[in-house]
């Protein structure tokens, strides 16, 4: 009968426990890095620094334009959710757009898109998502819980503008994924169409992609552990956060925009999202554009594409 080497077994068990502990601590680090709110807007990527002067001109416009501060309170939070509403120049206009911001941004960071739609005759609603800006929330939900908050923003818009309101959902990056995930919910008939610029197909695919690209780490064991931590903190597993699954239920016309050279949310995700939706749809892959750069490369062309889509479906 073979003798058991207790010393060797003990060393193996100790090593396994050590690896498990290191994996958990690393996963907790990644969770906090990716999901914990940050009360400032991080500096933009180096490839978009050249647009800084134009960006701050748009922010200056946002600060000066007439607007209303809207709020509502969510369950379990003492603070409120926050959004800014900019009425259309023509106060009788029923045209309105809800603009969903990107990761670690806020409504103000979408000033360029707000001004574009405002000049097209729209009223504009700019929410701050959970864990961002002036809104409540300890953690970022990557659009999943935000989609439910947007249902409340839509009801407030309809109360403000009336049943004749005509609403466009628009988002960029995480905001694009937010409106894509919102598309699978029971939306009021006032919502006419969706425009999604560089949204991810799922948070599973996006985090796996970034783990490999930025940290040179495999999906396992980190992703399942981060998902478990998220379930404990926010009540759902990361596998639930899927634009693709929500888009399968979408019935609205949708316009997908994505930068050809996006290295943060790869452009193949736009194709996956496009293929998931059976509604009327269009896709524009913007030549030479990096992540969320499509507007900045040529604002006039960007506006022209959106105008043509809205003329067809809005």
Image (cartoon, helix red, strand yellow):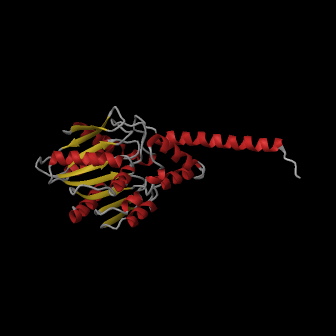
27 horizontally vs 151: left or right: right
Please determine whether, in this image, residue 82 is positioned above or below residue 112. Answer: above
Specify the farthest residue to the front.
1
Please determine whether, in this image, residue 221 is positioned above or below residue 288. Answer: above
Q: In the image, residue 66 lies at what x, y percent? A: 18, 39
Using the rendered image of the protein, determine whether residue 29 is visible from the camera's viewpoint: yes
Q: In the image, residue 251 lies at what x, y percent? A: 29, 63
Using the rendered image of the protein, determine whether residue 88 is visible from the camera's viewpoint: no
Specify the farthest residue to the left.
92
Please tell me which residue is depicted at 31% across the width and 57% down the height of the picture: 195
Name the residue nearer the viewer: 14 or 53. Answer: 14
Name the residue nearer the viewer: 12 or 273. Answer: 12
Specify the farthest residue to the right.
1
Please determine whether, in this image, residue 15 is positioned above or below residue 218. Answer: above
- Residue 82, by quadrant, is top left
Specify the farthest residue to the top.
78
Q: In the image, residue 212 lies at what x, y percent? A: 57, 52
The C terminus sits in image quarter: bottom left
242 horizontally vs 101: left or right: right
Please tell me which residue is depicted at 23% across the width and 47% down the height of the picture: 155
Name the residue nearer the viewer: 124 or 30. Answer: 30
135 horizontally vs 272: left or right: left
- Residue 307, by quadrant, is bottom left
Please tell me which residue is depicted at 40% across the width and 55% down the height of the picture: 199
Please tell me which residue is depicted at 22% across the width and 66% down the height of the picture: 312
Name the residue nearer the viewer: 287 or 27. Answer: 27
Count of marks placed on residues: 0
Q: In the image, residue 230 lies at what x, y percent? A: 48, 44
């Amino acid at each position: 009968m073979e003798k058991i080497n207790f010393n060797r077994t003990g060393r193996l068990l100790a090593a396994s426990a050590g690896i498990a502990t290191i994996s958990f601590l690393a996963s907790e680090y990644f969770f906090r890095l990716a999901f914990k709110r940050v009360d400032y807007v991080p500096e933009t990527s180096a490839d978009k620094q050249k647009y800084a002067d134009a960006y701050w001109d748009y922010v200056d416009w946002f600060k000066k334009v007439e607007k209303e501060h809207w709020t509502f309170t969510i369950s379990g939070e003492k603070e409120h959710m926050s959004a800014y509403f900019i009425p259309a120049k023509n106060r009788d206009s029923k045209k309105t757009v809800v603009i969903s911001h990107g990761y670690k941004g806020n409504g103000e960071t979408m000033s360029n898109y707000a001004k574009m739609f405002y000049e097209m005759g729209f009223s504009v609603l700019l929410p701050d998502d959970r864990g961002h800006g002036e809104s409540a929330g300890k953690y970022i939900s990557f659009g999943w819980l935000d989609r439910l908050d947007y249902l409340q923003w839509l009801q407030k818009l309809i109360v403000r503008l009336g049943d004749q309101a005509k609403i466009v959902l628009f988002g960029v990056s995480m905001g694009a994924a937010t409106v894509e995930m919102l598309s699978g919910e029971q939306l009021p008939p006032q919502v006419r169409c969706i425009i999604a610029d560089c949204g991810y197909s799922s948070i599973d695919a996006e985090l796996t992609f970034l783990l490999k690209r930025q940290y040179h780490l495999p999906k396992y064991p980190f992703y399942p552990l981060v998902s478990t931590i998220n379930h404990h903190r926010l009540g759902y597993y990361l596998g639930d956060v899927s634009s693709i699954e929500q888009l399968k239920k979408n019935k609205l016309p949708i316009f997908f925009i994505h930068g050809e050279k996006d290295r943060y949310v790869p452009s193949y995700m736009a194709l996956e999202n496009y293929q998931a939706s059976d509604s009327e749809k269009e896709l524009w892959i913007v030549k030479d554009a990096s992540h969320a750069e499509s507007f900045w490369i040529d604002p006039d062309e960007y506006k022209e594409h959106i105008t043509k889509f809205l003329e067809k479906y809005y």
